[in-house]
């Protein structure tokens, strides 16, 4: 895969490369909407609501 960002269909994390570092899958999409960047998931209400446990850049909706 190229260096362009794609989104993991399972954890919704933005990924560069061939494998998602968060969930170790290779199932990606280029169809997504909305972005949330989480620095401290334990202190973030939004992260808790959408189920994010690790810091990173995530899509809100993934096809």
Image: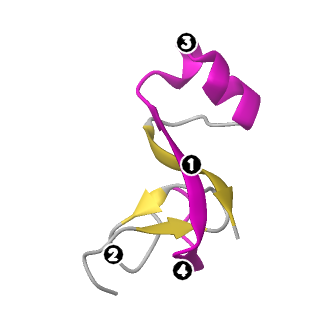
* SS state under label 1: strand
Residue annotated with mark 4? 26
Residue 52 located left or right of residue 55:
right
Which residues lie in the magenta part? Answer: 22-50
* SS state under label 2: loop
* SS state under label 4: loop
Determine the CA span between mark 3 and mark 2: 29 Å
N-terminal label among 1 and 2: 2
State the quadrant of the N terminus.
bottom left
Residue annotated with mark 2? 17
Q: Is residue 38 magenta?
A: yes
N-terminal label among 4 and 2: 2
Circle 4 or circle 1, nearest the eye:
1
Determine the CA span between mark 4 and mark 1: 21 Å
* 33 relative to 42, above or below: below
Residue annotated with mark 3? 43
- Residue farthest top in this picture: 43
Residue annotated with mark 1? 34
Question: Quarter of the image holding residue 37?
Answer: top left
Asked if the residues shown at circle 3 and circle 4 are in contact, with their CB atoms under 8 angstroms apart, the answer is no
Residue 9's spot in the image, x, y percent? 64, 68
């Amino acid at each position: 895969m190229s260096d362009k960002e794609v989104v993991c269909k399972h954890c919704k994390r933005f990924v560069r490369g061939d494998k998602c570092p968060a969930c170790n899958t290779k199932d990606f999409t280029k169809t997504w909407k909305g972005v949330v960047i989480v620095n401290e998931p334990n202190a973030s209400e939004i992260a808790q609501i959408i189920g994010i446990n690790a810091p990173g850049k995530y899509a809100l909706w993934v096809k």
